[in-house]
Amino acid sequence: MTLQQEQQKSQQEYHSKAATLNDAEKMALEKELNQALAKKQLEVMEPIQTKINQAIAKAAQAKGIYQVVKAEEMLYGGTDLTKDVIEMIK
């Protein structure tokens, strides 16, 4: 099941159960569903993030770069590895 499908399922479950619950129970259900959705998001994103991190490490190593920072954190200079990382992920 995709993350979007999981989110839709959670919304449907909440709406079907919420009508019979008091405010405290609604909050508890919302918290439970949000935690399940966060867990699913982690399951989906973890392998993707691992692949990206590996590509960043390989691109940096290939160019002899020992430290990599996000572009928005770089004030001046640096080498942009974005294109190299994208090519390695393809």
Image: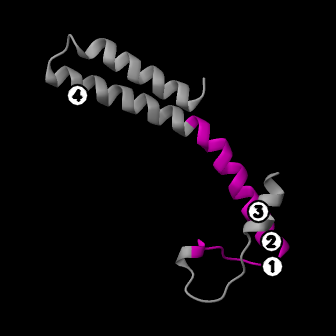
Residue at the spot of label 2:
61
Residue 85 marker: 3
Residue 79 lies in the magenta stretch: no
Q: Earlier in the sequence, mark 1 or mark 3?
A: 1
Query: Pointer 2 and pointer 1: residues touching (CB < 8 Å)?
Result: yes
Q: Characterize the local packing of mark 1: few (<14), some (14-19) or many (20 or more) Cα atoms within 10 angstroms.
A: few
What's the magenta bit mostly, secondary-structure-wise? helix
Residue at the spot of label 1:
64
Q: Secondary structure at mark 4?
A: helix
Q: Characterize the local packing of mark 4: few (<14), some (14-19) or many (20 or more) Cα atoms within 10 angstroms.
A: few
Which dot, 1 or 3, sits closer to the camera?
Answer: 3
Indicate how the structure is coloured in the image.
Answer: one colour
Q: Earlier in the sequence, mark 2 or mark 4?
A: 4
Residue 19 marker: none
Up the image or down, 61 lies above or below 36; here it is below
Q: Secondary structure at mark 1?
A: loop
Quadrant housing residue 23: top left
